[in-house]
C-alpha cells in the first residue's frame, strides 16, 4: 500500500498512470516513468478485486464474467479472503503443531531406547511423506479445478488495477472486515472447499504470483523444517546414544579424572555425586565403590584395576612357545614334626654336594639345588614347614612344583601330615610320598600306605597314582629312588620358562644382615636375574649388587628355578614377595612407593571401616578377654611368620596371645624396651640376645626364652596363656539332710532338727532348702550343732541342728542340700 501512497505524492495523474512529470526550480521539467514491481501490484490486486467487486461490479454487472450475481461474487470473494486468513491461521497452527510434535518427539526420544526412537522417527518421516503426497495429490486436484474458478476473480483484479488509486483504501477496509468474519465463514465451508483452499497453495497461478510463492516456500520450508527436525532428531539420537565406555578405576580416583575417563562433564559428575549426598569437589578422590555407582549412573562399565597404572610397566607378556626352555622343578618337603624333613633335606644335600665344592660346606639360604645321577637338576626349598608354603601362596607366589610328603614308617599319619596333604591339594601341586625311617626295626611302610588311603592319597603300591618311595635319611637308603621319582614327576609336568626375558621370582627368605644390609633369597621363576638389574620386590626396590648361590659362590646371573641371594635392596622384603625386573630406577621406585602407599591406605581403610558400633562391641569384648603379649625374634622370616601364625591360633574367646612385634635377627635392647613397656616375654627362636640386651633384660626383669622347636614354644605359650584363664567354678554336692522337727530358740530363731541322710553336713558349705524337690532358698548356715555344741561337720546318719542365715521359713519334711563350690584352673585345648 505504501507504493500507492508513493505514487500519490509523486503526483500521479489518472490519465497517465506510470508516468510522472517532474518540475524543477530552474524551470526544467522531466518525465519519469514509474515502474511498479509486479509483486507490489499483486497485493492490491485481490484487494482491488474485492473493491472492484464491491462497487463497480455492483454498478455494472455486465463487466462481471459469466454473469455472476452480486451475492455470488461477494460470497466468492469472502471465501477467498477467508481462505487467506485460514491459511495464515493454518500456518500458525502448523507451526504450533510442528512445535508440539517436536516437543512430543523430544519427550519420546528421552523415554525410549535410541533404536526405538530412530524407528519412530522413520515412521514419522514416512507419515510426513505420505501427508506430503496427499497434499500434492490435492494440489493436483486443485490445479484441475482452478481453471474454472480462476478466471472469475481475474477480471475483477484487472478492474481493481485500473481503479487502484481511488479504490484501494476502501478495499483494504473491506478486506479487514472480511478477515474479521473469516472464522465464522470457515466454519460454514464445506470440507471439499476447505481442502481446495489448502491445496490452492501450489496451483500454477499461485506459483507464478510472488505472493503465493512465499506460501509455497513455506511448504518447502516446512518440508525442510521437517527434514531438519528429523535430522536433528536423528542427530540428537546419535548424540544421545551413549558410547558405553569401559572405565578403569583403581582403589581411589579423583573426581575430575573419573569424569575424564567416562568422557563426561566434570560438573555433571559432581552434580550426581551431590545427589548421592557426597559433597566433593572435582579435585577430591572417591573410592572405587562410589565411582562404580557414578559410572553406572552414566551408563558406562566399571573396570576395576587392582594395581594402579604404575604397575603396568611390569611386563606380563606371555612367552612364545619357541622361547620356552625346560627348567628344574622346585620341591618342598612337608610332613609332621620329627618325621625327618630336615634330616632328609640334609641327607639329599650331603649326598649330592661333592666335598670339593665350597669346601663341602653349604650355606643355608633357604633353598638349594642338586643334580641327580642322570644329570637332572632339582631345586629344593629348605624353609621350615607348612607356614612358609601357605604364607607364600597367600601372597600370590606359587613357588612349589612338587611336594614331597614325609611320613615316618615307625609312626603313623599325624595331624600335620594331613595338613600337608590338604595344602598340597589346595595348591594343586602333585605329591610324592617319602616313607622315612625305613631303617628302623619298627618301620611298617605298608601301615603308612594304608593310613594314607583314608586321606585320599592312593600310592602306587596301592594301585594309585601317587609315587611312594621308602627311604632313610640316616642310611641314605632310597634317596636316589626318591630323586628319580621327583625327576619323573617333573618330566610329566613339563616345566618350562623363558630364560631370555626380564626376570621375575619369589622371595623365599629375607633378612637384614649386619654386614651386607638387606638380603633376600629369591627363587627365579622366569627370565634371568643379572647383576646390575633394577628390580622391585614387594614394597622394596633395588639394583642387584651381587648374586650369591646356594654354595656361597658369587654368580653373575641366575636363570629359572635357581635360588640366589640378592644383595642391593633398599629394604627387607617379606617371604612370598614377588620380584620383578624393570627398566629404570624411577619405575622401580615409583612402583615400590605406590605399593607402600597402597598397603598403608589399605590398612588405614581397614581400620577406619569399622563403625562406631563395631568399635563399641569390640571394646566391650576386649574387656573380657585376657591377653598374653609376646615378642618374637627368629632366625629367618619364614620361622617368624610360622611362629606368629601358631601363636594366633592359641587361645579362645577369653584368652589370646598377642604378638606385639616380630622380626628377624638377634634380640636387641630395643626389643627388651618394648617388652618391658608391655610386660611381655621375649621369645628367641634360633637366635640369642646380644650382651646389652641381656644386661638390660636382667635389669628390667624381662624374661627371655630360647627355643629351637616351634612346638615346644607353642606348648609353653599355651601353658602361660592358660594361667590367664579365669578359674572355672564348679559345684560339688556333699550331703543331704532331712528336717525332722523345727524348734524356736530365743536369740537364734528357728532351728531345724535334722538327720544327715547322705554325705556330710558342713558348717562352711552352701545350703539349699528343697521343698518337694523345688529349691525355695539358697544360702549359708548360721549354726550347725551336734547336741549342744557348735561343730564343723556332721557325718551321715547323725542328727544335728541347723539354722539358716537370714532365713526362717523351714518346715518338717524339707530337705537341705549341702554343697561346696570349687574353683578349677582351666587349660587351653
Ligand atoms: P623334622 O622335624 O621333620 O624336620 O624331623 P628331623 O629331621 O628333625 O628328624 C627328627 C628325628 O628323627 C631326628 O632325631 C632324626 O635323627 C630322626 N630321623 C630322621 N630321619 C631318620 C631316619 O631315616 N631313620 C632314623 N632312624 N631316624 C631318623
Image (tube, rainbow, N blue to C red):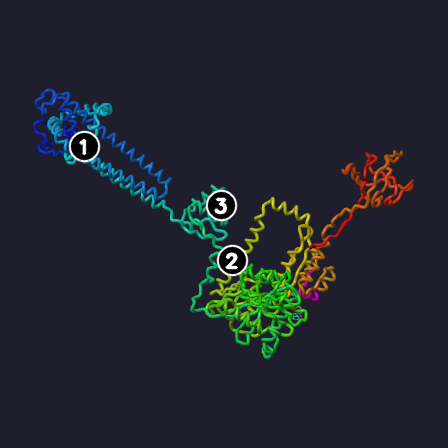
> Magenta includes 690?
yes
C-alpha distance separating marks 1 and 3:
64 Å
Ligand 1, image quadrant it occupies: bottom right
What is the crowding at mark 1: few (fewer than 14 residues within 10 Å), some, or many (at least 20)?
many
> x%, y% of residue 369?
56, 72
Q: For residue 365, which quarter of the picture? A: bottom right
Q: Which residue is mark 2?
A: 594
Q: Which residue is mark 1?
A: 200
Mark 2 C-beta closer than 8 Å to ligand 1: no
Q: Earlier in the sequence, mark 1 or mark 3?
A: 1
> x%, y% of residue 585?
49, 64
The secondary element bearing badge 1 is classed as helix
Seen from the viewer's position, the closer of residues 576 and 186 is: 576
Residue visible at 27% across and 33% down?
A: 94
**Extreme residue in the front direction:** 463
**Extreme residue in the bottom direction:** 356
The secondary element bearing badge 3 is classed as loop
Closer to the eye: label 2 or 1: 1
Q: Earlier in the sequence, mark 3 or mark 2?
A: 3
Circles 2, 1 touching at the beta carbon (< 8 Å): no
What is the crowding at mark 3: few (fewer than 14 residues within 10 Å), some, or many (at least 20)?
some
Q: Which mark is residue 280?
A: 3
Closer to the eye: label 3 or 2: 2
> x%, y% of residue 329?
53, 69
Relative side of 445 to 766, left or right: left
Give the magenta-colored segment's residue range: 682-693
C-alpha distance separating marks 3 and 2:
24 Å
Relative side of 739 to 647, left or right: right
Quarter occupied by the C terminus: bottom right
Circles 3, 2 touching at the beta carbon (< 8 Å): no
Amino acid at each position: 500500500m505504501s507504493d500507492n501512497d508513493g505514487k500519490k505524492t509523486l503526483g500521479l495523474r489518472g490519465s497517465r498512470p506510470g508516468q510522472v512529470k517532474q518540475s524543477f526550480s530552474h524551470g526544467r521539467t522531466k518525465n519519469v516513468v514509474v515502474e511498479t514491481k509486479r509483486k507490489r501490484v499483486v497485493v492490491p490486486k485481490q484487494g482491488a478485486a474485492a473493491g472492484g467487486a464491491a462497487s463497480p461490479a455492483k454498478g455494472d454487472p455486465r463487466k462481471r464474467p459469466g454473469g455472476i450475481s452480486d451475492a455470488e461474487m461477494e460470497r466468492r470473494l469472502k471465501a477467498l479472503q477467508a481462505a487467506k486468513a485460514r491459511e495464515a491461521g493454518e500456518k500458525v497452527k502448523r507451526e504450533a503443531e510442528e512445535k508440539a510434535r517436536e516437543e512430543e518427539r523430544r519427550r519420546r526420544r528421552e523415554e525410549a531406547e535410541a533404536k526405538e526412537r530412530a524407528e519412530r522417527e522413520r515412521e514419522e518421516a514416512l507419515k510426513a511423506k505420505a501427508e506430503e503426497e496427499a497434499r500434492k495429490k490435492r494440489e493436483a486436484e486443485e490445479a484441475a479445478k482452478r481453471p474454472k474458478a480462476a478466471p472469475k476473480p481475474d477480471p475483477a483484479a484487472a478492474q481493481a488495477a485500473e481503479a487502484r488509486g481511488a479504490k484501494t483504501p476502501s478495499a483494504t477496509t473491506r478486506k479487514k472486515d472480511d478477515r474479521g468474519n473469516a472464522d465464522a465463514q470457515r466454519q460454514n465451508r464445506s470440507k471439499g472447499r476447505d481442502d481446495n483452499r489448502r491445496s490452492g497453495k501450489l496451483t500454477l497461478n499461485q506459483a507464478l504470483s510472488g505472493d503465493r510463492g512465499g506460501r509455497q516456500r513455506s511448504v518447502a520450508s516446512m518440508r525442510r523444517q521437517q527434514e531438519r527436525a528429523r535430522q536433528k532428531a536423528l542427530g540428537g539420537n546419535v548424540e544421545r546414544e551413549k558410547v558405553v565406555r569401559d572405565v578403569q578405576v583403581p582403589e581411589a580416583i579423583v573426581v575430575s579424572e573419573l569424569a575424564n575417563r567416562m568422557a563426561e562433564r566434570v560438573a555433571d559428575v559432581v552434580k550426581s555425586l551431590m545427589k548421592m549426598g557426597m559433597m566433593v569437589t572435582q579435585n577430591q578422590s572417591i573410592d572405587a565403590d562410589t565411582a562404580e555407582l557414578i559410572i553406572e549412573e552414566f551408563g558406562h562399565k566399571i573396570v576395576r584395576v587392582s594395581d594402579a597404572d604404575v604397575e603396568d610397566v611390569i611386563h606380563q607378556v606371555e612367552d612364545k612357545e619357541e622361547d620356552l626352555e625346560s627348567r628344574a622343578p622346585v620341591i618342598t618337603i612337608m610332613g609332621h614334626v620329627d618325621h625327618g624333613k630336615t634330616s632328609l633335606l640334609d641327607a639329599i644335600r650331603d649326598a649330592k654336594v661333592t666335598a670339593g665344592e665350597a669346601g663341602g660346606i653349604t650355606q643355608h639360604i633357604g633353598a638349594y639345588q642338586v643334580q641327580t645321577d642322570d644329570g637332572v637338576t632339582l631345586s629344593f626349598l629348605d624353609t621350615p614347614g607348612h607356614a612358609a608354603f601357605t604364607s607364600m601362596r597367600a601372597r600370590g607366589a606359587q613357588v612349589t612344583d612338587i611336594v614331597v610328603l614325609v611320613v615316618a614308617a615307625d609312626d603313623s599319619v599325624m595331624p600335620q601330615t594331613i595338613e600337608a596333604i590338604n595344602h598340597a591339594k589346595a595348591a594343586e601341586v602333585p605329591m610324592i610320598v617319602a616313607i622315612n625311617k625305613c631303617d628302623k626295626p619298627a618301620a611298617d611302610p605298608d601301615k603308612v600306605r594304608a593310613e594314607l588311603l583314608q586321606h585320599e592319597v592312593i600310592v602306587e603300591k596301592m594301585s594309585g597314582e601317587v609315587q611312594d618311595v621308602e627311604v632313610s635319611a640316616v642310611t641314605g637308603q632310597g634317596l636316589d629312588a626318591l630323586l628319580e621319582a621327583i625327576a619323573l614327576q617333573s618330566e610329566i609336568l613339563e616345566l618350562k620358562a623363558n630364560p631370555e626375558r626380564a626376570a621375575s621370582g619369589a622371595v623365599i627368605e629375607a633378612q637384614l644382615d649386619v654386614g651386607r644390609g638387606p638380603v633376600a633369597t629369591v627363587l627365579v621363576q622366569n627370565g634371568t636375574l643379572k647383576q646390575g638389574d633394577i628390580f622391585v620386590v614387594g614394597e622394596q626396590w633395588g639394583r642387584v649388587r651381587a648374586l650369591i648361590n646356594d654354595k656361597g659362590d658369587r654368580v653373575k646371573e641366575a636363570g629359572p628355578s635357581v635360588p640366589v641371594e640378592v644383595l642391593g635392596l633398599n629394604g627387607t622384603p617379606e617371604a612370598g614377595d614377588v620380584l620383578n625386573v624393570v627398566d629404570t630406577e624411577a619405575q622401580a621406585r615409583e612402583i615400590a612407593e605406590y605399593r607402600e602407599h597402597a598397603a598403608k591406605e589399605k590398612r588405614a581403610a581397614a581400620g577406619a571401616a569399622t563403625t562406631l558400633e563395631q568399635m563399641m562391641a569390640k571394646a566391650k569384648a576386649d574387656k573380657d578377654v585376657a591377653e598374653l603379649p609376646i615378642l618374637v625374634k627368629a632366625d629367618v622370616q619364614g620361622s617368624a611368620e610360622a611362629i606368629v601364625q601358631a601363636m594366633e591360633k592359641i587361645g579362645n574367646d577369653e584368652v589370646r596371645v598377642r604378638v606385639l612385634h616380630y622380626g628377624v635377627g638377634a634380640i636387641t635392647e630395643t626389643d627388651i624396651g618394648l617388652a618391658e613397656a608391655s610386660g611381655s616375654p621375649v621369645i628367641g627362636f634360633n637366635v640369642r640376645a646380644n650382651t646389652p640386651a641381656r644386661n638390660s633384660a636382667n635389669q628390667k626383669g624381662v624374661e627371655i626364652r630360647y627355643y629351637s622347636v616351634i612346638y615346644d614354644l607353642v606348648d609353653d605359650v599355651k601353658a602361660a596363656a592358660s594361667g590367664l584363664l579365669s578359674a572355672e567354678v564348679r559345684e560339688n554336692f556333699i550331703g543331704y539332710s532331712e528336717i525332722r522337727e523345727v524348734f524356736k530358740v530365743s536369740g537364734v530363731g528357728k532351728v531345724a532338727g535334722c538327720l544327715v541322710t547322705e554325705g556330710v553336713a558342713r558348717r562352711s558349705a552352701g545350703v539349699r532348702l528343697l521343698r518337694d524337690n523345688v529349691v525355695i532358698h539358697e544360702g549359708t548356715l548360721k549354726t550347725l550343732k551336734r547336741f549342744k555344741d557348735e561343730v564343723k561337720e556332721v557325718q551321715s546318719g547323725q542328727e544335728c541342728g541347723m539354722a539358716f542365715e537370714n532365713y526362717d521359713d523351714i518346715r518338717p519334711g524339707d530337705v537341705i542340700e549341702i554343697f561346696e563350690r570349687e574353683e578349677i584352673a582351666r587349660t587351653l585345648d
